[in-house]
Image (tube, helix red, strand yellow):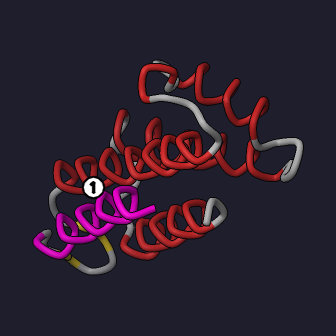
Amino acid sequence: MKESLRYLQNAKEILARTPIEGNNYADVKFVREAFGTAYLAILEAINEALLKKGLSKKEFPKSVEGYRKALQQYFSVHNGRLMRDFESLYDMLHIAGYYRGLIYNTTVVKDALKATKEFIDKFK
């Protein structure tokens, strides 16, 4: 999980450089960048877990639908919540946070990064 944690740390570093006004990040651009990096941390965690399952890098998923299928095929048998957590984080990090830039409240952002860390830890 080394690479995925490095991505998560990078997301936190991006946020640390972002000014805060009241209880919100002042520049949504950097929050979006941090969310995109945190989402990549999740994908890296899944990739690292797939390596442990014996898959090669060429066999890694190429789309979000591919990641869904990989989670169902290799991990959901053991942990049914994993898929729900992935979907929730996909919606929060990738769609609302990165793609649409709708999340900039400091508490919500920190909770999202905490949930990302908890997701990554499930693959240890």
Q: Main secondary structure of the magenta part?
A: helix
> Looking at this view, is 62 or 94 the one in front?
62
Q: Position of residue 98 (x, y in %)?
A: 34, 41
Asked whether 22 falls inside the magenta stretch, the response is: no
Q: Residues within 10 Å of mark 1 (few under 14, many from 20)?
A: many
In this image, 32 relative to 120: left or right?
left
- Would you name the residue on which mark 1 appears? 34
Q: How many marks?
A: 1
Q: Looking at numbered disc 1 in the image, what kind of residue is underneath it?
A: Ala
Left or right: 95, with 19 as reference point: right
Whether residue 92 is situated above or below residue 108 in the rendered picture: above
Where does the image place residue 104, in percent across and percent down from the top left? Answer: 34, 60
Is 8 part of what is drawn in magenta? yes
What residue occupies the far bottom of the structure in this picture? 22
Report the side of 95 relative to 32 (left or right).
right
Residue at horizontal 19 percent and vertical 70 percent from the top: 13
Q: Is residue 78 above or below residue 124?
A: above
Q: Position of residue 16 (x, y in %)?
A: 18, 76
Q: Closer to the camera, 39 or 120?
A: 120
Dot 1 lies on which element?
A: helix
Q: Residue at 27% across / 55% down in the picture?
A: 34
Q: Which quadrant of the structure image shows residue 74? A: top right
| Quarter occupied by the C terminus | bottom right
The image quarter in which residue 123 lies: bottom right
> What's the residue at 29%, 63% (across, down)?
6
- Residue drawn at x 36%, y 73% is 106
- The magenta span reads 1-17
Position of residue 75 measured from the top left corner of the image (x, y, whole percent): 76, 43
